[in-house]
Each structure stands twice: as C-alpha cells, then as structure tokens.
Image (tube, rainbow, N blue to C red):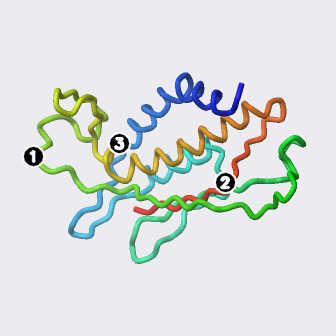
C-alpha cells in the first residue's frame, strides 16, 4: 500500500477515538488567564502536554521559564536522523541533513467562559451540539481557541510519523521531508 493509503487507514481506524479523547482531556484542564493578570497553576497542563509530546515521538521536549511570573513555554522538536533511515530512502542524490523547518506556535491558556454560556453545559466538558443551521460541532473551553489548534498540529505530526513507521516496515523508522519545531505559551 502507498503511504497515502496508510495515512487514510490510520486516521479512520486508529486515531479518531484517540483524537477526541485528547481533545476531551485538554478541554478539561482549567488553564484560564484572568483579565486582571492573575495566572493559573500551569503544572497540570505542563504535565499533560509533555506526555502528549512524548507519545507523539517528539524530541528535545523542554519546559522553559518565560520569566515575569508568566506560565512556562513548552518546546519540542522532531529532527530527521539520517543515520537511522532505511537504505531505500537514505542518501538519495542531493539529499542533505539541511531540511526545511516548520515552526508551529500555539498557546494553551484560555479566557474564562462568559457567564452567559455557563448555564448551557459545563464549559470544561467537551460536548457535541447539533443545530439545523450549523450542523454538528464540539463545544468546550479552548475548542475554537489555542488548545484545539495546538493539539491538531501535534496530532498531525504524530499521525505522519506513525504512518511512516508502518510504511517502512520492518525498520520502523519515522521519516518526514522536513523538521518540525513546536513552541507553546500560556
């Protein structure tokens, strides 16, 4: 099967449930920045993010001090290791270690939900709502903000690396045509 077929199969059969589970978990973390400048305790979201980044096979995961009483920054990267590539893809003519680098920036803090929405459902619980006008949609704090977008970027790289591992059996080496660096702030 082609790599594209592998990715389609993985998205359909392996990651769908896990992606929703991850979204449920990250929505439940109360990482609220108050307008008064007060900050949240970042330990829970830091622990969750580190675990997710490790599970996604990212490297060099670091929690960095942002200073000035700001929540920490989270850095992770995936850099192609040419020494581990299988012979059929390693050392193509003209291929060097100087691959393009994609920087993914995101934020994990959210604003407190408006009081007008508090009666509809628990804002810290992922819920699915249907409307004849809008169709199905997921609701929860951070679903349309930074939490969901940073999660989608990590999950996309995770799926690509997993698909590459499956495609290049038996070596099980992940490979992408670029390096990826993540920087998340609160």
Residue 92 in picture, x, y percent from top left: 86, 51
- The earlier-in-sequence mark between 2 and 1 is 2
In screen coordinates, is 23 left or right of 97? left
Q: Which residue is the extreme one toward the bottom?
A: 68
* Residue shown at the point (67%, 57%) measured from the top left: 179
Residue denoted by label 1: 116
In screen coordinates, is 78 left or right of 118? right
- The earlier-in-sequence mark between 1 and 3 is 3
In this picture, is 123 found above or below 34? above
Q: In which quarter of the image is residue 14?
A: top right
Which quadrant is home to the N terminus?
top right
* Residue shown at the point (39%, 46%) measured from the top left: 148
Q: How far apart are marks 1 and 3 (CA)?
A: 19 Å
Closer to the camera in the image, 79 or 177: 177
Mark 1 Cα shell of 10 Å, populated few (<14), some (14-19), many (≥20): few
Between disc 2 and disc 1, the foreground one is 2
Residue 30 in picture, x, y percent from top left: 32, 49
In screen coordinates, is 173 left or right of 78? right
Residue denoted by label 2: 78
Instruction: Assign a secondary structure to mark 2.
Output: strand
Q: Residue 27 carries which label?
A: 3
């Amino acid at each position: 099967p082609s790599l594209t077929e592998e990715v389609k199969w993985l998205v359909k059969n392996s990651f769908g449930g896990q992606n929703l589970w991850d979204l449920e978990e990250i929505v439940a973390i109360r990482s609220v920045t108050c307008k008064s400048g007060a900050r949240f305790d970042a330990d829970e979201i830091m622990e969750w993010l580190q675990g997710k980044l490790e599970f996604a096979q990212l490297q060099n995961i670091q929690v960095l001090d942002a200073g000035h009483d700001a929540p920490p920054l989270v850095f992770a990267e995936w850099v192609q290791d040419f020494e581990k590539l299988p012979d059929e893809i390693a050392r193509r003519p003209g291929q060097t270690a100087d691959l393009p680098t994609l920087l993914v920036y995101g934020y994990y803090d959210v604003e407190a939900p408006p009081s007008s929405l508090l009666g509809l459902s628990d804002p810290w619980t992922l819920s699915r709502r249907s409307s004849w006008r809008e169709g199905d949609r997921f609701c929860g704090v951070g679903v349309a903000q930074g939490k969901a977008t940073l999660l989608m970027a990590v999950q996309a790289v995770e799926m690509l690396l997993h698909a590459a591992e499956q495609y290049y059996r038996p070596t099980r080496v992940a490979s992408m045509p670029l390096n990826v660096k993540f920087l998340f702030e609160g």
